[in-house]
Image: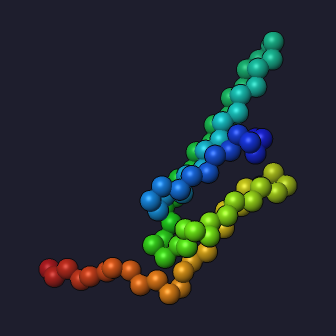
Amino acid sequence: IDPSKVKVTCKDRDLIVQAEDKQENPDNYSQTYYYRRCTLPENTDFNALKCVFDNNTLAIKAPLNMDYHGNHRSIPI
């Protein structure tokens, strides 16, 4: 798929990769659709997310913030 047809978005902690390609010829029709969604860890450094497309491979780098301390609490049973 052509890199210009790939869309990478991040909403809240969800990273979404979408791509769609259509090819039409007089004798046939082809459509390719790709969708992948994953939830990133809370300690992801969202300001440092990077996408690189090299040799027909998409790489997404999401570094972690090791100084992050989440808001976890124990719930009594």
The residue shown at (57%, 52%) is 9
| Left or right, residue 53 beside residue 14 | right
Tell which of 46 and 61 is nearer to you. Answer: 46
Q: How many marks?
A: 0
73 lies above or below 25:
below
The residue shown at (49%, 76%) is 43
Dividing the image into 4 quarters, which one contains the N terminus? top right
Task: Check the image and name the residue furthest to the left.
Answer: 77
Instruction: Tell me residue 49's x, y (percent).
Output: 62, 66
| Left or right, residue 73 beside residue 67 | left
Task: Check the image and name the residue furthest to the bottom.
Answer: 67
Instruction: Tell me residue 57's x, y (percent).
Output: 77, 55
The residue shown at (61%, 74%) is 63
7 lies above or below 50:
above
Instruction: Tell me residue 60's x, y (percent).
Output: 67, 62
Task: Check the image and name the residue furthest to the front.
Answer: 47
The residue shown at (81%, 51%) is 56
Dividing the image into 4 quarters, which one contains the C terminus? bottom left
| Left or right, residue 7 beside residue 26 | left
Q: How is the image coloured?
A: rainbow
Task: Check the image and name the residue furthest to the right.
Answer: 55
Displayed quadrant of residue 73:
bottom left
58 lies above or below 28:
below
Instruction: Tell me residue 39's x, y (percent).
Output: 48, 62
